[in-house]
Amino acid sequence: MDEITIHSIREAAGRIAPLARRTPVWRSRSFDERAGCQAFFKCENLQKGGAFKIRGAANFIFSIPEQDRPRGVVAWSSGNHAQAVAIAARHLGIPATLVMPADAPRSKMEATRAQGARIVLYDRLRESREEIGRRISKETGATLVPPFDHPWIIAGQGACALEFLEQQPDLDALVVCLGGGGLLAGCAIAARSLRPAIRIYGVEPEIANDYWLSLRRGEPVEIAPPSTIADGLRTTKPGRWNFPIIQRLVDEVLLVSEDEIREAARFILTRMKLVVEPSGAVAAAAALAGRLPQRFARVGIVLSGGNVDLETLAGL
Amino acid sequence: MDEITIHSIREAAGRIAPLARRTPVWRSRSFDERAGCQAFFKCENLQKGGAFKIRGAANFIFSIPEQDRPRGVVAWSSGNHAQAVAIAARHLGIPATLVMPADAPRSKMEATRAQGARIVLYDRLRESREEIGRRISKETGATLVPPFDHPWIIAGQGACALEFLEQQPDLDALVVCLGGGGLLAGCAIAARSLRPAIRIYGVEPEIANDYWLSLRRGEPVEIAPPSTIADGLRTTKPGRWNFPIIQRLVDEVLLVSEDEIREAARFILTRMKLVVEPSGAVAAAAALAGRLPQRFARVGIVLSGGNVDLETLAGL
């Protein structure tokens, strides 16, 4: 399982097909006019569970050996990964425990609970979710499902770009949001393999720039917990599996401001009439704010998720 | 121009094709599970201008005789019709004046202004928009574009159902929101002609039930200005052209409560990830709240518009 290739990603795509949806690719004339390119949106906000996370979580959980499954799974997450783990576990009929920050969006918490999972809350600024998760795993024998730092997760997320390039093979650039790097690493492997000359960009909030810093430094750097509105991208350091993949295959990591994220989310909601969460609008923000380093004819943008409280929408 | 037939509607569809979009038909597994049918959503929230209104407005304005066009058009509207008139007028390069209530959603007012139209505000509870509109028409020679009560408007709106049944020919029922009756009358003519056995339902807010009362009475009844959250359906009486068509072709007018409208809008936003305005969710509300008088296998629902202030979303 060391090396993740297009073959692992194809396998993952087949494995998760009973659960993950083939999400549509969306167009918007108003976005094209504003961004000065033809933009193609991979609508992972319409994915099962409302975000791309089901791809990695399902690939991981469906790969757990039969004999370990009855003891269940445990995971930590600000929300979308939690919900994905809950859905995939329920699909196999095994118990799931989720460690979630007490200030996670209510919609994500409720959706997770509705899937029959047990939720353990923690204080994001004072407690370590990893420690809590590991302790639960030790006590119950449940398998830890990491949010991004694992080949099975990365291969699962890669199925997003595999599908995207099947649906729209002639993309010149692929733009993906960047938190822990699960989605970007998987998508980079798939896209680089299927279309070697494609430009691949990761996009981080300026105030959650752990990858941007790490790539400049040449090694993983840890930052203080960031408070970006893009709550799904509040990771503090690159994944060990993810970092070298991104270092090798991604052309550049771009940064967007909080205002640019808000503006992109607002645009997608009011002009494109799609519900997107702030994290899900980060890649679109780079294109809308003119942050891509060159002009491209056809730009693929992943709308990574749509789980957002109506109060957050109002705040935009 | 007396009788509106499927031929007038086909002509209208051809006439407005340069401006109106062929909107997609959307599915949602979660909606189907909740409503107990296969629901097909005609996404007029993704229409040019964010609502079905462009169909009627463009058909009307494109039908104005050449010699009358330079004097422009004038219309009154709580928003979506205004925007549609502004867009269609701009398309022909003729001036547009819009009479809008001072309390219309800000998003609709801004969108109308952005199309280069002149806006005249009035007090919805104390002034008559018809009078203001007629005075402007008299003074300037601008052609009045009525919001619903005209064969050209009705034929244009009918193109929505024509398209819908081309995209999904096997619908058992068609559910359409009902304000002045332009959309419902046009859709009823198209649907009854293309698929005679289809059941056709109009849906009104309980507190804006002018059609429901009028149909029971057998003649148009006027109600006090209703304050429903579905601001696009705040008409006080049926149109003279629209009423007899609806009386003849529509199976039943259904009523939904304000809570049912809010719940449907919330469901479409949070589960289907589509932005819909409260008026646009009224037809879906009838299916979701179990108001359809019988069970159908395949139900066509028109999502009539998506122009909503983010503050209104928060209020849901």
Image: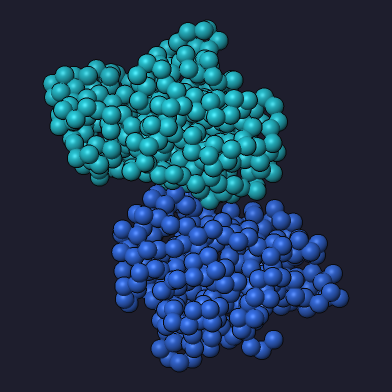
Chain colours: A cyan, B blue
In this view, A91 is above or below A104 = below
Estimate the x, y position of residue A183 in percent, counting from the top left. 45, 28
Kindly identify the residue that appears in the image at 53 percent across and 39 percent down. Answer: A166
* Quadrant, the C terminus of chain B: bottom left
Seen from this angle, which residue lies furthest left?
A: A139
As drawn, A71 above or below A20? above
Q: Is residue A198 left or right of residue B1?
A: left
Visible residue check, residue B18: yes
Q: Residue at x 22, y 27 (%)?
A: A65
Q: Is residue B266 visible?
A: no
Q: In front here: A68 or B164?
A: A68
Q: Is residue A118 left or right of residue B229?
A: left
Residue A260's spot in the image, x, y percent?
A: 58, 33
Where's residue B34, x and y in %?
A: 31, 59
Question: In the image, what residue occupies the spot 54% across and 75% down?
Answer: B187
Q: Residue at x 53, y 15 (%)?
A: A248
Which quadrant is home to the N terminus of chain B?
Answer: bottom right
Q: Quadrant of residue A252?
A: top right
Classify residue B231 as left or right of residue A128: right
Q: For the image shown, how many numbered marks are present on the structure?
A: 0
Q: Is residue B11 above or below residue A311?
A: below
Q: How far across and down, in percent of the image, does residue B79 sit?
A: 60, 63
* Horizontal relation, residue A26 to residue B145: left or right: left
